[in-house]
Image (cartoon, rainbow, N blue to C red):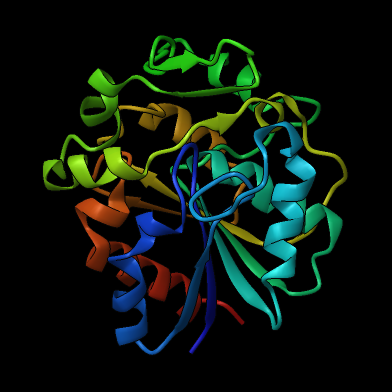
Amino acid sequence: MSEFLLVHGTGHGAWCWRDVIPELARLGHHVRAIDLPCHGEDQTPIADASLGNYARAILDALEVPTIVVGHSMGGFPITQAACLQPDNIRHLVYLCAYVPAPKTCLVEMRKDWPEQPLANAFEVAADRQSFRFKPDLIQDRLYQDCPEVVEFSRDHLCDEPMAPSMTAISGWHKVPSSYIRCTKDRAIPPAYQAKMAKGCDARFDIDTGHSPFFADPAGLAALLDRISAGLT
C-alpha cells in the first residue's frame, strides 16, 4: 500500500480526480487530492497566487512519504515542492505534465515545440492576472475521449493565475520520477511529452487524451499501482 497525493493542472481542482481516487483505493492505496491555491474550494485571491504557495500547499498536505502525481501544469508545483523540501516525497509522477527545464517558466515551455495546440486556447483577463480555457475549445483540447464530463467540467473549471506560469523553478532535487505520456493528447503533443520524459527514471503510456482521470480512471490507477509496486 502506498500513499498518493494527486495534484491537478491548469484551471482544474481536486474534483478532476473523483474517478481515480476510488480506483486507487480499491487497489489498496491511500489517496488524496488537493486544491492548489485559487482553485476548487480554495479561496486564495488570484493576486496572491505564486508557484511558491502552490508548492507549499503540496508540502503542507504531506505527512508521510508519498507518491506525488502532477497533471499537466501540475508538473511545475510538484517539482518546486521537491526542490524545497523532499523529505516526504517518495516519488514524482508526471501525468502528461510539464517537466520543468532550468531557468524556464511554463509559458516559455508551452512555446518550446513546433506544434502549438494551446496557442489560441486561452482567454486572458482584462487585468492580465489570470486566464481561462476558451469554452468552445474545452472538449476538443481536454476531453475529446470523455465527452460525458464536458458539462461537469465546464461548471468546475476556474481562472488560472498568471504569475505561477511566469515563474521558473528555483533549486534542484534528487527525487526519482516517472512519466505517463497520453498518446492521444491534444493539449500537450505526445512527441513533446516523450522529449520531456527522457529525464525521468521510468516512462509509461496510456492511450487517452489529456484527461486520463476521466477517460480511463481504472487504467490510470493500474499504471500508478504499477509504478508504486516498482519502488523500493
Q: Position of residue 104 (x, y in %)?
A: 74, 24
Of 58 and 179, the residue lying toward us? 58
96, above or below 78, in the image: above
Inspect this view and state whether residue 202 appears. no
Of residues 163 and 202, the one nearer the viewer is 163
In the image, residue 66 sits, relative to residue 11, either above or below, namely below
Count how many numbered circles sit on residues in the image.
Answer: 0
Instruction: Mark yes or no: residue 127 visible.
Output: yes
Q: Seen in the image, is 19 located left or right of residue 87?
A: left
Residue under the image location 74 percent in, 65 percent down: 59
In front: 30, or 90? 30
Percent coordinates x, y for residue 15 in the rendering: 38, 58
From the viewer's perspective, tell me whether residue 145 is left or right of residue 225. Answer: left
The C terminus, quarter of image = bottom right
Left or right position of 193 against 24: right
Image position, residue 208 (x, y; %): 24, 45
Q: Residue furthest left?
A: 148
At x 46%, y 70%, the residue is 227
Give the residue at x 25% y 54%. 214
Which residue: 31% across, 62% down?
Answer: 220
- Of 210 and 21, nearer the camera is 21
Q: Residue 183 at what x, y percent from top left?
A: 29, 39
User: Where, by quadrant of the figure, is residue 154 drawn?
Assistant: top left
